[in-house]
Amino acid sequence: MINRFNNIDSKEWLPYQKSWFKFTTDEDLFRKSIRFFMKFDSEEMDRNFFFWGNPEQDKIAKNCALEEAAHFFSGDKLNNASQLQFALLDVRGMMEQVVDEQSWQKLKAQILNLAAQLKEKLYHRRFLSIIIPNLQTEDHYFPLAWDLAKTLSATLSLKDEKIGCMEIPESTASQNHFHTDNQLFYQLFFRTDEKSGTQESTEDFGFLKHQRLPDFQHKGLFPSWFILKPKPRNRKEILHPAKFPEELVNLYLDVFTREKDLVLDPMCGTGSTVVAAIAKNRNTVGIELSEFFSKIASERCHSVYHQNPNLFEKPIDRETFFKVINKDIREIDSADIGHLDYVFTSPPYWNMLNMKGAENQAKRVRRGLQVNYSDPESELGKLDLGNMDSYEEFLDELEKIYNHLFELLKPGAVMTIVVKNIKKHGSNYPFAWDLALRLMKKMILLPESFWLQDDISIAPYGFGNTFVSNTFHQYCLSFSKPLTP
């Protein structure tokens, strides 16, 4: 296959497509980005590269570029370049100056102004990448990377993201999967293409809309990342096309709940949350629209509760209750379940399971397994959010569901939602960010954590033509209900 995009082979291309990476050095980060996004033997494009960062980063980027035979431009030298193959902005060194809304808007305006200039300089279908963290202070959390991405997507096409994770030294590591040294950042990718400038500017996240972070005992655990390699699914669990592992639920139950707390999953599928909660001696309720999956969830719960006492670290308190209800969560009220101490759930990722030709879907078809949650033409399918065609209507309905659950949560209780951003038909839908923006109107967004997947084969999407990541990170978004209205 001819590589029209850069000069690297598949052995170097494929690892770069992984949507998260363990950060080592700026030199490694800059060099890999330059090598991936530039073609040095092109007869059609100059080898021009632009960088914007602090002086120390500028030196590192310049050395990397020159060693790779790229022509380097930075700072106020942009006008000296004809056209650019790639531009890289590193905002990490500038975040210390962001202390309030005014200082963020000033930095954001600089970035947006520079991006507008770069849009005119970049060759068609070439990339601008921005490295930026979200901002956590002692009392507040501000998703500035998401805010910038959504705002800038009105100028350039938002194509992708990668998550940079600083690895904690072994000497200070903990058995608790959440612990890192709190260094985590985003590498955002924008492209100049036929869709650039066609998206309307969206509501931003604001800076001081957020309420004060609750004084959690575990507040220092965020932001965070962890790698899970769960045990294989059994024959019942594999019937569900998008099950998450009990090992994931356990991490959050340990942080946000105590024994006898009431835990809910409003879309429980085959019962990961309720099974994990039973094993942790929590009272728990699962709601599931599908009768088929709710029966599996119920069977799994009874099996764990009654037949496998050895699964528990200590004997289960037989007064602990659980139930799985086959019903639409929109029809559930406090009389059905009581008031909640914690919610852990994962919604449908829009209608992605109905996309024909998806690799995972093809595998399930070959094995005779169900490829989606329900038949879109059935009565059940008409209620299923996973069958909705309109992205905005899907978000509207999901917002209503979570606002309904908000009323059932006790003050100070937490809701954790496992989601990811979506790539569909060449467009990027920032599902995690869009959902967070809507829910922050009532709830306090806690610093995000990431479930990183490291046991999935990398597919060569876009090989030789453009950058498309393999999305191997899931957002675990947690929201706290304010103690006072």
Image (cartoon, rainbow, N blue to C red):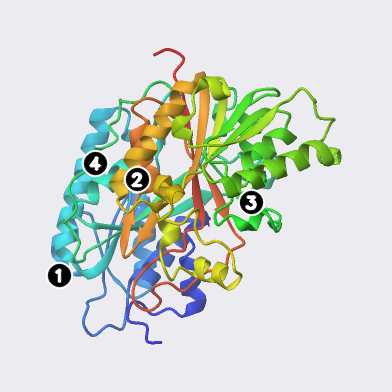
From the viewer's perspective, is the residue at label 2 or at label 3 nearer?
Answer: 2
Cα separation, mark 4 vs mark 3, equals: 35 Å
From the viewer's perspective, is the residue at label 4 or at label 2 nearer?
Answer: 2
Q: Residues within 10 Å of mark 2 (few under 14, many from 20)?
A: some
Quadrant where the C terminus sits is: top left
State the SS at label 1: loop
State the SS at label 2: helix
Query: Where is mark 2, residue-wise?
Result: 394
Q: Residues within 10 Å of mark 3 (few under 14, many from 20)?
A: some
Cα separation, mark 1 vs mark 3, equals: 46 Å
Query: Where is mark 1, residue-wise?
Result: 82
Query: Where is mark 4, residue-wise?
Result: 108
Position of 452 with respect to 305 (left or right) is left
Residue 300 has which mark? none
Q: Amino acid at mark 2?
A: Phe
Within the image, what quadrant is residue 116 found in? bottom left
Q: Residues within 10 Å of mark 1 (few under 14, many from 20)?
A: few
* Residue 454 in view: yes
Mark positioned earlier in the residue sequence (4 or 3): 4
Q: Amino acid at mark 1?
A: Ser
